[in-house]
Amino acid sequence: MIEELKANITSSLIKNNAIRPELHWLKPSEVAKLLSLDEKWLAAAREGRKGVYGPPFIKIGSGKTSPIRYPLDKLIEWMNTFPLNPTGSRHFLSYCDFNKSAGPSDLWPFVLYENGTFDDIFESINSGKFSSQSNTRQLIWLAKSSIPN
């Protein structure tokens, strides 16, 4: 049920809100949250075991436990390889658009920092905070119903 409530993040939505996406690398956990996929699915897809190759990634080092990162621009390109299947869900081009017209079941991605502050994901990426605080942030989904009027 919760998965049905998640807003679909489209490649055009990301592209329209991110400045210079080639500069941003995402952790597997962040990509999994953005795409509403399991991290294990992403790991299997990196090897083509899910019948589809996952988004392009960078492995930093050659060891078994070397970190994996996903370049945002390549993630957008990968998302564009799948046909869009229209559903009843609405897509918003910015947080302002979301805040004005979202319904109670619509969600928007935010970044929560260790100190308790948060930013719209695209503002965080564009300001450089997303990259500079990569160890102290997590992605969260803000529901319209939780925003005070």
Image: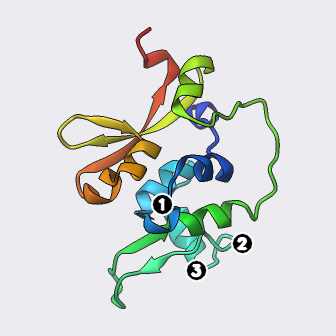
Q: Position of residue 90 (x, y in %)?
A: 70, 30
Cα–Cα span, label 2 and label 3 = 10 Å
**Which element carries disc 3, helix, strand or loop?**
loop
**Which element carries disc 1, helix, strand or loop?**
helix
Q: Quadrant of the N terminus?
A: top right
Q: Which residue is mark 3?
A: 47
Crowdedness near tag 3: few (<14), some (14–19) or many (≥20) residues, C-alpha within 10 Å: few
Which residue is at 36% across, 37% downward? Answer: 119
Cα–Cα span, label 1 and label 2 = 16 Å
The image quarter containing residue 117 is top left
Cα–Cα span, label 1 and label 3 = 13 Å
**Between 82 and 38, which is closer to the camera in this rendering?**
82
Q: Is residue 45 left or right of residue 64?
A: right
Q: Residue furthest top?
A: 149
| Amino acid type assigned to the residue bearing label 3 in the image | Glu
Q: Which residue is mark 2?
A: 51
Which residue is at 75% across, 65% downward? Answer: 81
| Amino acid type assigned to the residue bearing label 2 in the image | Gly
Proximity of marks 2 and 3: CB atoms separated by less than 8 Å: no
Which residue is at 61% across, 36% downward? Answer: 7
**Between 51 and 106, which is closer to the camera in this rendering?**
106
Q: Which residue is mark 1?
A: 39
| Amino acid type assigned to the residue bearing label 1 in the image | Glu
